[in-house]
Image (cartoon, rainbow, N blue to C red):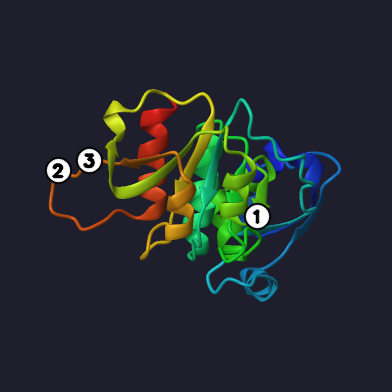
Amino acid sequence: MQELITGSAAAVKAVYATAQWLEGRRVPAGIAVEMVTPEVLKQLSSLSTPNQALALADMPSLPPLRLEGAVSLALDTLQDPGNLGTIIRIADWFGIRQVICSPDSADAYNAKTIQATMGSLLRVPVYVQPLVELLQAHPHIPSYAATLHGDNIVNVPPLKEGIILIGNESRGLSAAVLEHCSRRITIPRLGEAESLNAAVATGIICGRLLI
């Protein structure tokens, strides 16, 4: 919450928080602040166990989607809001300026997604677009599909431009998306685990290919 109101204060209109959360904190001028009890906060929140503060903020306006000269994340049918929120935060950490979700992915404005982004949602635009259409419309942009059987990411040069494709938590990327990707990449497995969490895999791939 503190990251949200300090990093994106212009979008935040009001904060509803407990006395404990407000103690010793400074809320930027222009943001309305209302002290509420934990019971009232729970009534305001759609979460069963809300934190000590809620913010009312404008939905960010989306700039035009531009893939040229940038690295983007594209998520195919990602279902878990927590995973989506964590991936948006990962994108923010690594300087990825846009995330593209397939229409059947979790909602970027789901309460659990927003909570998991820790404020990054107001800095990283999230677009909703069919991924096959996206890849067909931009054949000149290299695309890297995260799979269990692809090129070892250790051997992939750092990216300056491209689309990193992350698939569904249980099924991975769809056959249609894989058909249109430029290259399949894999995190080398050293142990016996069957798979990695989608957000964890995204963090590992970004850490290897963007630094």
Q: Report, in whole angstroms, how far the alpha carbon at label 1 lies from the one at label 3.
A: 30 Å
Q: Nearer the viewer, residue 137 or 13?
A: 137
Q: Amino acid at mark 1?
A: Gln
Picture layout, residue 112 above or below residue 205 = below
Q: Which residue is mark 3?
A: 188
User: Is residue 119 visible in the rendered structure shown here?
Assistant: no
Residue at (65, 70) in percent of width and height: 45
User: Is residue 84 visible in the rendered structure shown here?
Assistant: yes
User: First in sequence: mark 1 or mark 2?
Assistant: 1
Left/right of residue 73 with respect to residue 6 in the rendered view: left
Q: In the rendered view of the protein, which quadrant contains the C terminus?
A: top left
Q: Amino acid at mark 3?
A: Pro
Q: Which residue is mark 1?
A: 129
Farthest residue to the right: give it: 30
In which quarter of the view is residue 151 placed?
top left
Picture layout, residue 64 above or below residue 198 = above
Q: Regarding mark 2 in the picture, which secondary structure is present there?
A: loop
Q: Amino acid at mark 2?
A: Leu
User: First in sequence: mark 1 or mark 3?
Assistant: 1
Q: Nearer the viewer, residue 126 or 176?
A: 176
Badge number at residue 168? none
Left/right of residue 189 with respect to residue 162 in the rendered view: left
**For the residues bearing labels 3 and 2, Cβ distance under 8 angstroms:** yes
Q: Which residue is mark 2?
A: 190
Q: Report, in whole angstroms, how far the alpha carbon at label 3 lies from the one at label 2.
A: 6 Å
